Structures are given as structure tokens and as C-alpha cells.
Amino acid sequence: MNVALWIAAGVLALAFAAAGLMKVTGKREQMLERMPWVADYSQGQVKAIGAVEVLGALGLILPAVTGIAPVLVPLAAVGLAITSVLAAVMHVRRGDGFASTIPVLVLFALAVFVAWGRFGAYAF
């Protein structure tokens, strides 16, 4: 189970780090092509969302690898699960359709799995 949790945390960290870095460093015009929801938010809000995603991704991996405050791993997973729920709500409110919420729900499920495992019997 520990291997499955590491794989889930790694996939989750890669997905959120990539998405977050794109939001933090990308130009608004480029983001609008891939993510039309960006038009509904200010540049600062989009960068803040990206920063939360990057910090969550780092929180999934670094505390476990370094052994410094490993309790942050399940907390980061809970934070990313909340972020996923908020993203799904935003997509539903925008009327983006169910297809755009599927990746968000998959990330939510991975985050819940990591939080469950790392808070439970497979904690560090």
C-alpha cells in the first residue's frame, strides 16, 4: 500500500505542479486558449491559484522525502482535495460540462486516497 500511496502522491504532485507553474508563469493570452475560465478571474487570482497548487505539490513530496514534518503530507493532500472540489464547482457553475470536471474529480480521488493513507495506517 505504501508504494501505491507514493505513486498516487507522485502523480498528484506532478499534475498540480505542472498546472500551478503554468498559472504562475504563463501569460494570460496563452492561458485563455487552454483554460477559458481564466477570463472570469483577475491575473492575481489566477497566480494565487497556481501558487496554492505548486505549494500543495511540494507539500506532498518534500516533507516525506526530508523527514521534516511529515504530517504535512496528508494536510497537503486535504488542501489539494479542497482545491479540486472548488475547481469542480467552478466548472459546473460555468456550464463547462461534465467532461471538463472528470480530470478534476480524478485528482480529487487521488488526493483523498493519499490523505486517507497518510493519516491512517500508512503514516510516516
Image: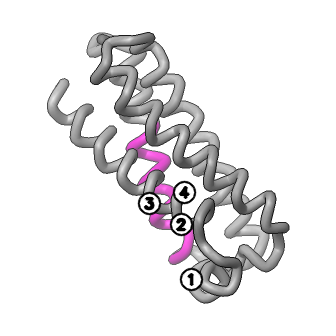
Query: Are discs 3 and 4 less than 8 Å apart at CB?
Result: yes
Above/below status of 5 relative to 28: above
Q: Which residue is identified by label 4?
A: 20
Q: Is 27 left or right of 117, judged from the image as shown?
A: right
Q: Earlier in the sequence, mark 1 or mark 3?
A: 3
Asked if residue 3 is among those painted magenta in the image, a careful observer would answer no
Task: Kindly state the secondary structure of the residue where label 2 is placed.
Answer: helix
Task: Kindly state the secondary structure of the residue where label 3 is placed.
Answer: helix
Above/below status of 47 relative to 96: above
| Quadrant of the rendered image containing residue 28 | bottom right
Query: Are discs 4 and 2 less than 8 Å apart at CB?
Result: yes
Q: Earlier in the sequence, mark 1 or mark 2?
A: 2
Residue type at tag 1: Arg
Where's the C terminus, which quadrant? top left
Task: Kindly state the secondary structure of the residue where label 1 is placed.
Answer: helix
Q: Which residue is identified by label 1?
A: 34
Count of marks placed on residues: 4
Marks 1 and 3, how far apart at CA = 13 Å
Question: Which region shows up in magenta?
Answer: 99-111
Q: Residues within 10 Å of mark 1 (few under 14, many from 20)?
A: few
Q: Residue at 22% of width from left, 41% of height from top?
A: 7
| Quadrant of the rendered image containing residue 37 | bottom right
The majority secondary structure of the magenta stretch comes to helix
Q: Earlier in the sequence, mark 1 or mark 4?
A: 4
Q: Which residue is identified by label 3?
A: 18
Considering depth in this image, is 37 or 29 the residue closer to the camera? Answer: 29
Mark sitting on residue 22: 2
Task: Kindly state the secondary structure of the residue where label 4 is placed.
Answer: helix
* Mark in the foreground, 1 or 2: 2
| Quadrant of the rendered image containing residue 20 | bottom right
